[in-house]
Amino acid sequence: MKPKRKEQETSTVGRGFDDRYGSHLVGRGIATFPVLLLRWQAGLGLGNGELVTLLHVLSYYRQGGKWPSVSINALAEARDVARGVVEGEISQLEAKGYVARAGTDGRFGTFFYDLGGLFATLEEFVIAEQKLADLRRQQTQLRASALRGRFGHKETDTENEIKNKSKRTHRQREQTVRTDSEEGVAEFESGTRPVEGAVDCRAGAVAAEKPSE
């Protein structure tokens, strides 16, 4: 049984941004992004530079139904890289189907970045993780079933049939050996079955009584 949390802990520890980061950091802005983006970076085929660019773009995604817009110059300055580096990474993301430039923001003259392709791909990884979780559950169930079979469980009809057949075969072999042994003893006692390696003394005695010519 898990120990109960102290009442003081549950009342003072929260899950909000202020509780985790502090109000001063939260005041300067908090960005969110799907954790699958990090967990499946290799599966998505994202280089480190492409991933950082995506995270920067996502940090401007603050309203559902409205794609983020940010200038390439701002992205380059934040990373202290040349503008051409960021442009190249955005082009690679477009080629992979994760980003599409969807018009310009009239206020700043910057592009809107449509992330629909990225989100659709991440949905595929959601399904993949669900299937992996199902497989792990099946593996756990199979292991538990195997352990029950090893250390005692209700046997199936097939298992009982196999064991009973094995017992019958063993009993038949014992009966055959016992019968052969009993017949051999009877023949030996009646004199009808000579013992291998024994000497017939009676024949020797008759030969000794017969006079030599």
Image (cartoon, rainbow, N blue to C red):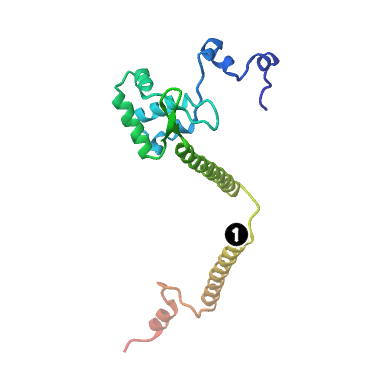
Q: Identify the residue shown where x is 66% and y is 53%.
A: 154
Label 1 belongs to which residue? Answer: 159
Q: Residue furthest top?
A: 24
- Looking at the image, residue 99 sits to the left or right of residue 160; the answer is left
Residue 100 lies, in percent from the top left, at: 41, 36
Q: Residue at x 36, y 24 (%)?
A: 72
Residue drawn at x 65%, y 15% is 9
Is residue 12 shown above or below 130? above
- How many numbered callouts? 1
Q: Nearer the viewer, residue 7 or 19?
A: 19
Image quadrant assignment for residue 17? top right
Image location (x, y in percent) of residue 62: 52, 25
Single out the residue that lies furthest toward the bottom: 213
The kind of residue on which mark 1 rests is Glu
- Quadrant in which the C terminus appears: bottom left
- Mark 1 crowd level (few <14, some 14–19, many ≥20, 10 Å Cα): few
Residue positioned 59% across, 50% down in the render: 149
- Of residues 160 and 10, the one nearer the viewer is 10
Answer above or below: position of 106 versus 196: above
- For this rendering, which residue is in front, 43 or 110? 110
Residue 124 is left or right of residue 7, and the answer is left
> Quadrant of the rendered structure where residue 212 is?
bottom left
**Relative image position of residue 114 (x, y in whole percent):** 45, 34
